[in-house]
Image: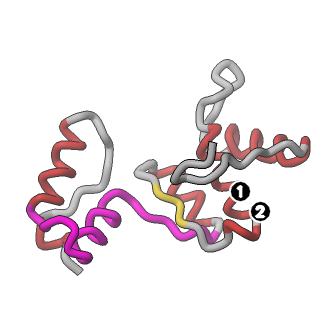
Amino acid sequence: MDGWLGLPIEVNDESDINDIERIRRAVFGGTEDRPPQHLGEAQTCFLILRRPELAGSWWVSDDKDALRYARHQGITTRETVDLVAIAVSNGDISASDGIDLMRQMVANGRSLRMPGSARELQY
């Protein structure tokens, strides 16, 4: 199915699969008893680093370990606060609505870096 995200990217090479598994365990703390745990993060970082067509892609996460790893690898990173600030800058949402949205996310259990005020969402 070719939706708005495009076709899924498959990793079939055994060496690549082993590298992804190493990243999943060593970097993100994935365990043997929970194989899918952190698999998406490991696959995404691996693909951004290894596939030329994905060079320059952004890594979007609010997970501190994932952000630290991606930044250390030279991957451009963004957090929810950055995406909301971009939406504010583009006029897609007001700064006050943006911070309210982020507060709702936190209230619903999301862990993300919050700006001190709505003004900080304005570039």
* Residue 123 point in image, percent of width and height: 23, 81
Between 121 and 13, which is closer to the camera in this rendering? 13
Instruction: Give whichever of 114, 5 is nearer the camera.
Output: 5
Please say whether residue 91 is one of the residues in the magenta stretch: yes
Secondary structure category for the residue under label 1:
helix
Q: Amino acid at mark 2?
A: Arg
At 47% from the left edge and 57% from the top edge, which residue is drawn?
60
Q: The magenta stretch spans which residues?
A: 74-96
Q: Residues within 10 Å of mark 2 (few under 14, many from 20)?
A: few
Q: Where does residue 49 sit, x and y in percent of width and height? A: 71, 64
Report which residue position mark 2 lands on. Answer: 50
- Compared to residue 98, the image places residue 42 above or below, namely above
**Horizontal side of residue 6 vs 83, given as left or right:** right
x, y percentage for residue 109?
27, 34
Query: Quarter-wise, where is residue 69 in the image?
Result: bottom right
What residue is drawn where x is 27% and y is 68%?
Answer: 87
Q: Which residue is mark 1?
A: 47
Which element is circle 2 on?
helix
The image quadrant where one finds the N terminus is top right
Q: CA distance from mark 2 to mark 1?
A: 5 Å
Determine whether, in the image, residue 72 is placed left or right of residue 18.
left
